[in-house]
Structure formats: structure tokens, C-alpha cells
Amino acid sequence: MGYNYSIDEIKKKVKISLGILFRNDSFLLENGANERSVAHKLAEYLQIQFPDWNVDCEYNRKGLAQKILDRIHECSKQKKTDRVYPDIIVHRRNTDDNLLVVEIKIKDEDCCDIEKLKKFTSTSGDFKYRLGLFIKFNEKEPLRWFENGTKTAN
């Protein structure tokens, strides 16, 4: 894996990006904009912080194949397949270099997002993202980090 940032550096860059989002785009959060709108703006700011990586929204590929998380459909009655579309990823396209995966919630929490982050960051899984991040914007402590398939201390 071609990681060139420490975990602390990644977290710092995410916090800088979130600060820019809050400063420039609070309108989106205050006025009920769709989660995808917020994810798109955050991804723009993350791209500035990670210029040597690709930052993509709703990216559904692993190489040329569909992005699949084995048995993720079991986390919800509404989920019919194991295909996944992470809100934001920081990666190098068409490689196994996966730095950060982000799931965002504006309103209610989705238990599937937590399960996805555990699977995406698992060292025994197909993706092995260095870090996962769950952001729930309407909470006092909005960030939950994941590493090696488990939630970590912030």
C-alpha cells in the first residue's frame, strides 16, 4: 500500500477540510440540502488536502469490477445487494491503494454505514482502507473513526 500520510496527518487534513466546509457551505447543512451535495463539497476540499490521491464520491468500482462488500445486504431489510457506493473515498484508482473511506449522515444514522466502514477498513477484507470515517453532522461529536475493522478513539 502506498500510504504517504500518518493517521494523525490524515485526521488533521480531514478536520481542515471540514472547517472549510463549515465556513464556505454551512448553508447546505442549515437548510436541509441532500447528503450528496454535502459529500460533493467535502470531497472538493479533501482533494485539495490530498493532491496526490484521487477523491471520488459514490465510487462503485474495485478495479474494473463492481464494488462489493460480502454480506453487507444483511444489515438492512431495504438493502437487496452487496453492491456499495461509499459517499467519499480517497484512493488511487485501479490500484489497491485505499487511504480513506467516508460515510456521511445528515439526519438519521444508518447502521449499514457503520458496518460498511468496519468491512472497508478490515485488514482481512478486499479493500483495506487505512481509515474509515463516519460523519453525522447534527451531533455534538460528529466524527467516528475506524481502523483495522473497528471503531477507534477520536
Image (cartoon, rainbow, N blue to C red):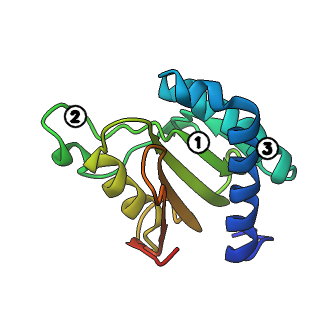
Task: Tell me the distance, in whole angstroms, between the alpha carbons under discs 3 and 2.
Answer: 30 Å
**Residue 62 in sight here:** no
The residue type indicated by label 3 comes to: Gln
Give the image quarter of residue 14.
bottom right
Asked if residue 97 lies left or right of residue 49, the reply is left
Asked if residue 145 lies left or right of residue 69, the reply is right
SS at circle 3: helix
| Mark toward the start of the polypeptide (3 vs 2) | 3
| Mark toward the start of the polypeptide (1 vs 3) | 3
Instruction: Name the residue rendered at 47%, 60% in the picture.
Output: 141
| Residue occupied by mark 2 | 79
Task: Tell me the distance, in whole angstroms, between the alpha carbons under discs 2 and 1.
Answer: 19 Å
| Mark toward the start of the polypeptide (2 vs 1) | 2
Instruction: Name the residue rendered at 76%, 55% in the picture.
Output: 16
Mark 3 vs mark 2: give the one in front: 3
- Residue placed most toward the observer, 140 or 53: 140
Task: Tell me the distance, in whole angstroms, between the alpha carbons under discs 1 and 3.
Answer: 11 Å
The residue type indicated by label 1 comes to: Ile
Residue 47, disc? 3
